[in-house]
Amino acid sequence: MSNENSTSEKAGSILEVREYKSLLSWLSSVDHKQIGIMYITTSLLFLLVGVALAMVMRTQLIKPNHHWLSPETYNQVFTMHGTTMVFLAVMPMLTGFMVYFTPLMIGARDVSFPRMNALAYWLYLMGGILIYFSFLTGDTLHAGWSAYAPLTSVNYSMNKYLVGTGVDYWIIGLLLTGAGTIMTAINILVTVVDLRPPDMKLTRIPLFVWMSSINAVLMVLALPALNAALVMLFMDRHLNALFFNTSAGGNPLLWEHSFWFFGHPEVYILILPGFGIISEVIPVFSRKPIFGYAFMTAATVAIGFLSFGVWAHHMFATGMNFTVYYVFALSTVLIAVPTGIKIFNWIATMWGGSISFDTAMLFCIAFIIQFTIGGLSGVVFATVPVDWELTHSYFVVAHFHYTLLGGTIFTVMAGFYYWYPKITGRMLFEGLGKIQFWLMVIGFNGTFFILHFAGLAGMPRRVYTYPDLPHLATINLISSCFAYVLGLGFLLFFINLVISLFKGKPANDNPWGGWTLEWATSSPPPAHNFDRIPPIRSIRPLWDLEQSQKQSGAAALPSHGGENV
Amino acid sequence: MDKFTSVLTPATKEASYILSSFYIVLGVSVIIFVIVAGLVVYATIRFRRRSGREAKQFSENFWLEVLWISIPLLIVAGLFMVAVRTMSLVNPPTLGDTPDLTVVAHQWWWELHYPRSGVTAANEIHLPVGKHLLLKFESADVIHGFWVPAFGQKIDVIPGHPNTMWLTITRPGRYLGTCSSFCGLGHADMRIQVFAESPEEFKAWLAHERQPALPPRTVEEKKGVQVFREKNCINCHSIAGLATKGREAPDLTHVGSRTTLAAGTLPNTSENLAKWLRNPQAVKKGTRMPDTGLTADQIKYLTTYLEGLK
Amino acid sequence: MLLFVASEAVFFLVLIIAYVAYHTTSSGAADAYRYLDVPRTAVFTICLISSSFTMWLADIRFRTGRRRPALVWLLVTIALGAIFLAGQGSEYASLISNNVTISRDLFGTTFFTLTGFHGLHVFIGLVMLATLFGLELKRGVTCPSGAVESVSIYWHFVDAVWMIIFPVVYLWVLR
């Protein structure tokens, strides 16, 4: 069934698809697959820049009292590293996967609002370019990605020694990308509600679609808070409003609250689709269904809900009253529970299975272990007095890199190795993939595990250099050396992406023996996605199909792609 | 770890409470991690693909789910209790007490006031050991952060929103800390030093700080005073007994007796002071200290005078 | 449209919270109240509320195919909305001439930001209503009923936000 695509011209690889050959087809596309590819490609470029910025940072921090970069430059670099990774690399990368795969996985032809889909992408691109334009003028935001007021106010940024007039580019750029994100979120939600074929009940949609949908709810409700905060800041800077002007009674904490009301759901936005990817990849490479589908869904809903109730845990050191702290400490420790449910369910999925160690699965395994470390260091911060000691230090830098890099990026890598054949019709090189994997695991853990100790040794974050206090020199040297290893891993990834496009083994419809609907069509899919959709009786339509064909005595279709496994 | 700079060597009662709760959370985390990682490693090895073995197609177990919801719930509830208890130990209510020390954070230096004795100083803090001290924090400009790792908690220093902290220092020594909230170009160069000493030594230091500045004696020192006036240093810097107008910059009444300059970034020597006066931006990029265009001689006189202000 | 309205609701929520937070802590408000003409604004508020009602009437008539009455009610809605905006504009003019501006104090800052963004949303709503009107008027071009329903939801939302802003800003006076 999945090999019959007789009515459409089956393209062997994405480079051969006739419709994709003209630039105009890309610029004017409203097809979710093309838009998804554009999101992913653009975010890969920003990822490359973000990684380069990180390499620069670790080089500056390689030894104490290092004055290779001026504080001005370093402050711009670390701010842009954070802004790029969060807004321009990771979020759009996940959005790209959501946009590409949600319609395919529910059996739809496209999203509900294809033109809005395209608009959202172009807003992202333009917003990103605007933010970077400031960087090229040498005067970007240099106050950290969280841009606390009143440091970002006009008083402190018009002097060239201080924060930089680039704040305005940053504000407008983020307003643009934020608008795009809200649009896409609406699109995904309406698609999942409206465009499912009758058999594709909500209890049968893949977990990636569930998590993308809940993620979309978070986007719709969190991004506006950022927009409001940015608007207030912009008005302070240009219309002489007084929101954050302390001499007029303004309160910097208003910025913090507004920003983190967005900022905390944002970090869940940065992980939920990743959780979805893991929930797709582990079952396929363990040859069993996902364990605890219902609990996984419920846990994700709980996380989504709770994520709006924890924001002030970023503000435990601001001197608010204890009642506030108790409430947020409680909600923060509670959110650890549904996350724990997921970890155990993933392990239970592997349990009793038949695990193959393709690169995609390797990234999943490393993810489980690394994300657990990140989650546990988060629980450390939920313990308020410990947060008082360790926040704003390298301990928190280690924590969020474990969740965002060891977590999200590793899920993205798994997603690439799993879905690249579907998108492009070619397999990524497994050998290169495995080398990349080991470089990244060793590099990542070497860089960031030791930074927990830098925090314990008293090193604050956002410093262009540090004094030669005990252990700091050794810790930072080790961290920087491993960072180069990690950088090499990223480089190999980009190389693999490019050369596989031309030289990768051609992929058939279902190289991994997956069971969700995207594998029931060609690689890459035709413009209309499906010629025929198999019957949908459970979360694994292709598995059911296989079983029923076995029972009716028909020759078992090769559910693994033959030589591709 | 070094005894005066790290989280793991607490020098106050409050820091010890915090460290204990850290070890509890850490212990729990390590156990959970070992279990999770162990399960993953075991599953990876035991259930790797081998010919002749099919994957078992089970996919749900209600009671297992209940188990791994209820146990973590109990654990986190326990951790929450630990947090609550430690919070009240570390930060009991202040009840409007007069602080022992008020710190005003500036870009990029620390202004110090000891309200009970009327002493004003800058950058280098002295505190007595063994007393339950109340510190108050205000900001003159943007958000800063006050963090001495060995003392325990850090606190954000927010304009328009004064904060307080209790400290009971348990062992004397010279403790190092840093500004912990990004505050602009000089954030990394805004260091903290606390000299924790016996109550008698502290009293003596306070008495010394209360004295006005030593009057200039030598010719060079007198010329230094002249430079200080002519170059309008008095507009920003105070020297008790000489000029007390300036509040924008560190008080220099006893600057000669400090161990460091420029908020802990330079050891206090004549060469370094000269270096600072010659080109402040080269030492601390972004500093508000202007380039005063002093000649070499003027620097010599000024340095001699200021170093003499012990 | 409901989802978009949800996201705009959060946006307004943050601005309302900013207003409320500063209203209770800063002192500029009591003074500025002298210049707020509550009865006059109440009249314009009634216009806006009525426009929601007339929009509802238009919506029903569109759905039941009574094109001409629908167009009439749509026009009335637009007129009422425009009167509201004009009223707001004249209010701004009188405030500014009395030196109550965005940079004078926190009341000015939060008042103008909150009501300003609301006014902007009303304006955008009027543009959408006018577009609907224009499309429907042109022979042979019919609005898909989905469009009327969407704009209707948006217009009711804009009204609902004002139902919160009016009491909070104009009626809640702290002495």
Image (cartoon, rainbow, N blue to C red):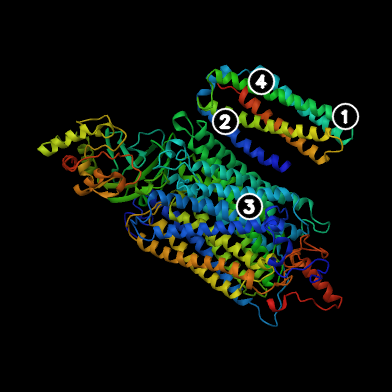
Tell me which corner region of the image, top left, top right, bottom left or bottom right, holds residue A139: top left
Horizontal and vertical percent for residue C46?
Answer: 73, 22
Mark number, residue C41: 4
Secondary element type, mark 4: helix
In the displayed structure, A100 sits above or below C102; it is: below
In the displayed structure, A399 sits above or below A177; it is: below
Q: Are marks 3 and 1 on the same chain?
A: no
Mark number, residue C19: 2
Residue at mark 2 to residue at mark 4: CA–CA distance: 18 Å
Q: In the rendered structure, which amino acid carries the disc numbered 1?
A: Arg
Q: Residues within 10 Å of mark 2 (few under 14, many from 20)?
A: many
Q: In the rendered structure, which amino acid carries the disc numbered 2?
A: Tyr
Q: Residues within 10 Å of mark 4 (few under 14, many from 20)?
A: some
Residue at mark 1 to residue at mark 4: CA–CA distance: 32 Å
Q: Residues within 10 Å of mark 3 (few under 14, many from 20)?
A: many
Mark number, residue A303: 3
Write down the chain letter for disc 1.
C
Secondary element type, mark 1: helix
Who is closer to the viewer here, C148 or B111?
Answer: C148
Residue at point 42% right, 63% down? A480
Who is closer to the viewer here, A270 or A349?
Answer: A270
Q: In the rendered structure, which amino acid carries the disc numbered 4?
A: Thr
Q: Residues within 10 Å of mark 1 (few under 14, many from 20)?
A: some
Horizontal and vertical percent for residue B6?
Answer: 36, 55
Residue at mark 3 to residue at mark 1: CA–CA distance: 50 Å
